[in-house]
């Protein structure tokens, strides 16, 4: 069940105290965990429908066979049940216990066979004998089961009944989209994949953090418009791109959200541009993070950023995560379960999203209206008469002096934060105080520069 959040509970941009959203995020993870998501099918629809109780996502269907650049929308896959029964009729592998037991996109099968015939269709992880591996075969028709290595070793010779009650037929590919209008048409694209079955860090963490990020943004004053897309990985982002080429010029910044629920350090994968405003904004938030953080250069693999960043689009889209996919042992196994993600990690990831949005929103360029010498700050209540230069009051002195000095129409507030080494939010607060005293004038037209 999705916990309903009263609008009054929502604190704007990072104002939530630690842990405020953690339990709500975990509740949503647990609710979505059992759904059998895949590249297509009812698991994706169920997931998007559940999110619609929190945010008004539009659900789009792309018919099977639709040309998507060099690809075509695949046939739709759905599954009701699957098992392997031994000679005594006992389910020795049971889809109802874990949807990871069946390889994603397995074609239907119902047959009897010896263990020797069945053996090539069974996948396990000898190094992690209690974990079930996640396997898929999206673009080659096949079927298979995954099981723990202990289960595999316990299988005795004899005849087995094998059943996968699935359908693989013309239907559609499903994705979700939410547009949150700001005062400018310029957009921030937020993308997360929705195609993994019972796996939590990859990818339920991205889904729930994106959903609550959207929920918070909807009740926060904003100048950017935000477009959230919930897509099956790769083919889903390409499907969205192919249907929205006319809107892409509005996208000024973008982020892919993935693997945000484990306890690893906050990690940023730069956009293909490397020095786009989104890169500088995210890296700035990490420089002032309370613990270690990691920044990685772009590489053309990973999640949907690789599609948004292909040369025909070249969108400035980075990716935020904690431990990168493929580098934690539990990745794509049944051990990536609700005990692997934590409320505290999810909450911190959501606050990080809010910090990034607050920095993007607040990054404007101003002109000092009293540029000949320093203005008399004391007269305006901006100078602490005790001479305390470290601040401690509402607005600190050093950020004020930095903003006054560099607000020559050439430097954005992020430029000033980087040059001064001060946190962006302190620079932003100083600019707000100076604006109130009519010492600054906005001189950009929406973008950060004049
Ligand atoms: Zn994955």
Image (cartoon, grey):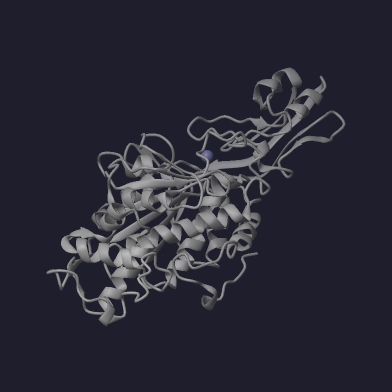
Residue 220 placement, left or right of 413: right
Residue 290 horizontal/vertical position (percent): 50, 52
**Which residue is rendered at x = 64% and y = 60% of the image?**
27
Picture quarter with the C terminus:
bottom left
- Between residue 270 and residue 332, name the one nearer to us: 270
**Which residue is rendered at x = 35% and y = 37% of the image?**
298
Residue 297 horizontal/vertical position (percent): 36, 37
Asked whether the viewer can see residue 101, the reply is yes
Residue 137 lies, with reference to residue 421, above or below; the image says: above
Residue 431 lies, with reference to residue 25, above or below; the image says: below
Asked whether the viewer can see residue 224, the reply is no
Q: Quadrant of residue 157?
A: top right
Q: Residue furthest right?
A: 88
Q: Quadrant of residue 166?
A: top right
Q: Residue furthest top?
A: 116
Residue 145 horizontal/vertical position (percent): 66, 31
- Between residue 258 and residue 169, name the one nearer to us: 258
Residue 253 horizontal/vertical position (percent): 31, 54
Residue 297 lies, with reference to residue 407, above or below; the image says: above
**Which residue is rendered at x = 50% and y = 44% of the image?**
39
Residue 346 placement, left or right of 86: left
Picture quarter with the N terminus:
bottom right
Q: Residue furthest front?
A: 386
């Amino acid at each position: 069940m999705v916990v309903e959040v009263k609008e009054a509970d929502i604190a704007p941009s990072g104002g939530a105290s630690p842990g405020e959203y953690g339990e709500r995020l975990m509740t949503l993870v647990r609710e979505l965990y059992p759904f059998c998501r895949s590249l297509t099918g009812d698991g994706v629809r169920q997931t998007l429908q559940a999110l619609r109780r929190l945010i008004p996502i539009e659900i789009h269907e792309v018919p099977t066979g639709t040309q998507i650049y060099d690809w075509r929308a695949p046939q739709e896959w759905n599954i009701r049940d699957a098992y392997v029964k031994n000679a005594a009729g006992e389910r020795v592998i049971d889809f109802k216990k874990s949807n990871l037991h069946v390889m994603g996109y397995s074609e239907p099968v119902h047959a009897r066979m010896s263990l020797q015939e069945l053996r090539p269709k069974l996948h396990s992880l000898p190094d992690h004998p209690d974990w079930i591996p996640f396997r898929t075969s999206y673009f080659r028709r096949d079927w298979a089961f995954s099981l723990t290595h202990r289960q595999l070793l316990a299988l005795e010779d004899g005849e087995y009944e094998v059943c996968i009650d699935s359908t693989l037929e013309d239907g559609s590919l499903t994705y979700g989209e939410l547009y949150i209008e700001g005062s400018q048409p310029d957009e921030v694209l937020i993308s997360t994949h929705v195609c993994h079955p019972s796996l939590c860090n990859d990818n339920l963490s991205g889904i729930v953090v994106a959903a609550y990020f959207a929920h918070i943004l909807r009740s926060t004053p904003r100048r950017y418009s935000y477009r959230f897309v919930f897509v099956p990985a790769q083919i889903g982002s390409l499907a969205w791109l192919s249907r929205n080429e006319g809107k892409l010029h509005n996208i000024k910044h973008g982020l892919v959200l993935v693997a945000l629920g484990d306890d690893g350090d906050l990690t940023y994968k730069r956009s293909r541009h490397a020095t786009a405003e989104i890169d500088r904004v995210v890296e700035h938030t990490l420089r002032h993070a309370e613990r270690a953080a990691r920044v990685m250069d772009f590489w053309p693999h990973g999640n949907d950023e690789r599609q948004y960043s292909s040369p025909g689009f070249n969108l400035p889209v980075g990716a935020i995560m904690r431990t990168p996919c493929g580098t934690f042992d539990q990745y794509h196994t049944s051990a990536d379960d609700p005990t692997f993600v934590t409320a505290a990690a999810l909450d911190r990831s959501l606050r990080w999203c809010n910090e990034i949005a607050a920095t993007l929103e607040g990054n404007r360029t101003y002109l000092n209206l009293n540029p000949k010498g320093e203005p008399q700050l004391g007269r305006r209540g901006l100078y602490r008469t005790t001479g305390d230069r470290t601040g401690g009051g509402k607005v600190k002195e050093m950020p004020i002096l930095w903003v006054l000095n560099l607000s020559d129409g050439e430097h954005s507030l992020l430029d000033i934060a980087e040059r001064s080494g001060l946190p962006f939010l302190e620079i932003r607060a100083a600019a707000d105080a100076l604006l109130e005293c009519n010492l600054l004038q906005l001189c950009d037209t929406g973008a950060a520069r004049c």
